[in-house]
Amino acid sequence: MATMADVARSAGVSVATVSHVLNGTRPVLPHTRQAVLDAVEELGYTPNTLARSLVTARTRSIGLAVSAISNPYFTETLQGVEAAALEHGYSLLIADPHDDPAHERTVVQLLHERRVEGMIVAPSPEPGGLLAYLRRHRVPAVFLDRLVGPPADDGPPLFDQVCAESTEPTTGLVTHLAGLGHRRIGLVAGLPGLSTTTERITGYRLGLAAAGLPFDERILVHGDSEAAGAERATAQLLRLGSRPTALITANNAMTIGALRALQAHGLSVPEDIALCCFDDFAWADLFSPRLTAVSQPSRDIGARAVRMLLDRLADPGRPARTERLPCSFVHRTSCGCPEERNPS
């Protein structure tokens, strides 16, 4: 196995120069830098990342705590995080908190003990333990997808945050269905306590008000952000004497659960009940009917989280900021509109 000394001999430079090129610790003349890189390539030299981190006190790694296994929405977000991290020379350590506050606190501590330089976290509905740990240990962190409110003293946010718009797009789904003549529009909402759940319920109620429709708490149910919960919640709606004629599901996992419940009850979309969903996904265009959806910029959110974290690492004292990225409406046919209508 080639060593740094081998690279130095091949390039005709000192070991210190090789170290400066590989670690970026001092400017090196372009032709010297290229000679070192050529030698690295020719010899197949692999830097000892662990040894380098002991010397520089930097691991060039980012901890990512998201429920990527239990929530398919985060799959594309994770891809955005990974691509941006690699682009900037960082590796990822990934843990799944399963939206459980106690487990969340544990996995964040484990990531911190592995000396990640900062963390990107999709917080659980009860992030008190998470916040306390990050504050106490002064861990640079960015919250992804779910927002955490300001401190109890109503001061400014303590952490950077990035998410998609949720309220206005949900309002748009309601008004679209109302415009098609629906007067009982149900919502399968997410896990209580998440900012995304709260904002989408707010958007739902604003959409009803804009369409002149009354709010009926019986047709707002919680699917807890997962397929099995949404299947149970949708079945509950279908047992009502006056069931909804249209349904909005608040994430892609819950869309799958709702479709299972509708199929189990022998109902067809959109003939028996119209359906719109928050979260587009890769196979939504393959369903019959094709699913009308709000599409979140998942990869962009992941990439933006990395850039915000790197900004924080470069300037720890900068004010925390919250960024929201716009969504888009993907118009297909599950809402009851004809196939030939162009997307809006």
Image (spheres, rainbow, N blue to C red):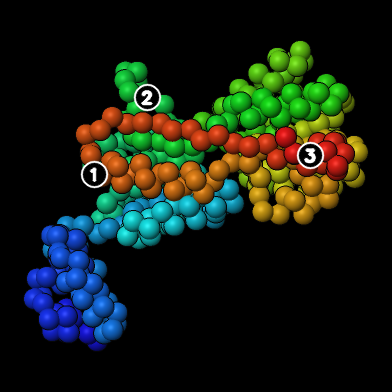
Give me the residue at 55% from left, 52% from top.
Answer: 76
Label 1: element kind = helix
The residue closer to the viewer here, 279 or 18, is: 18
The residue type indicated by label 3 comes to Asn
C-alpha separation, residue under disc 2 versus residue under disc 1 = 23 Å
The residue closer to the viewer here, 167 or 135, is: 167
Residue behind mark 3: 342
Q: Position of residue 317 (x, y in %)?
A: 21, 34
Label 3: element kind = loop
Q: Residue 150 shows which numbered tag?
A: 2
Earlier sequence position, callout 2 versus callout 1: 2
Q: Position of residue 107 (x, y in %)?
A: 38, 51
> Which mark is in front, 1 or 3?
3
C-alpha separation, residue under disc 2 versus residue under disc 3 = 42 Å
- Where is the C terminus found, in terms of image quarters? top right
Give me the residue at 25% from left, 59% from top.
Answer: 59
Could you say which quadrant of the image residue 242 lies in?
Answer: top right
Residue behind mark 1: 314
The residue type indicated by label 2 comes to Pro
Q: Position of residue 299 (x, y in %)?
A: 51, 49
Earlier sequence position, callout 1 versus callout 3: 1
C-alpha separation, residue under disc 1 versus residue under disc 3 = 46 Å
Give me the residue at 11% from left, 77% from top.
Answer: 13
